Structure formats: C-alpha cells, structure tokens
Amino acid sequence: MGKTLEQEYRTLLKVISENLKRLRKRAQLTQEQVSHQGGFHTRFYQKLESGTYSPNLFTLVRAARALKATLSDLLSTNHQKHA
C-alpha cells in the first residue's frame, strides 16, 4: 500500500526545506541574506527552511529567485546530499 496523502505532504515539505537549505549554502548566503533578497522576515524564512511552514506557490517563487534557483530546484528529489 502506498503513502497516505499526509505522508506525501510531509515528504514534500521535507524536500522543500532541505533544498532551501542546500541551495542557500551552495550560494554561500545566510538566512538573513536570503530573507532580505526574497522580501521575507528572517523568522519566516527560518520556518520555511525548517519545514514548519507550508509555503504557497508565490513564496516558493520568491525564495527560488532569492537563491538564483528555479522552482524545479526547490521541488527536486534528484540532488546530492552533500552540496
């Protein structure tokens, strides 16, 4: 039997949060710098990166732009763990 809808949702939130952190570190940016570039409050961005907030599409696009990445980069499960 496959994953439940709740499990799929939690998995996707984890993927997004891990990608945000990985892409930020790859760009050698602090959370504060990404927050500023994306127009977020730092605490809000920290919640995105920790997976405790479920972002809407507009937020994902803003975060991707701040990280000079694509929306696909944020949703991708095809990346190395050690960026």
Image: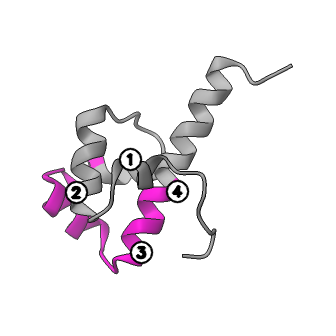
- Is 19 magenta? The answer is yes
- Which numbered disc, 4 or 2, marks the residue closer to the eye? 2
Please report the residue visible at 22 percent of the width from the left and 61 percent of the height from the top: 66
**41 up-or-down from 53: above or below:** below
SS at mark 1 in the image? helix
Task: Name which of mark 4 and mark 1 comes first in the sequence.
Answer: 4
Image disc number at residue 48: 1
* Image spot of residue 24 (x, y percent): 37, 69
**Disc 3 element:** helix
> What residue would you read off at disc 4?
18
What stretch of residues is rendered in magenta?
A: 18-44
Q: Earlier in the sequence, mark 4 or mark 3?
A: 4
Q: Residues within 10 Å of mark 4 (few under 14, many from 20)?
A: many
Say which of marks 1 and 3 sits in front. 3
Q: Amino acid at mark 2?
A: Arg
- Sequence-wise, which precedes: disc 1 or disc 2? 1
Relative to 18, is 48 on the left or the right? left
Q: Are marks 4 and 2 in contact (CB under 8 Å)?
A: no
Whether residue 42 appears in magenta in the rendering, the answer is: yes
Residue under label 3, please give it: 25
Marks 2 and 3 close (CB-CB < 8 Å): no
Q: Position of residue 6 (x, y in %)?
A: 63, 21
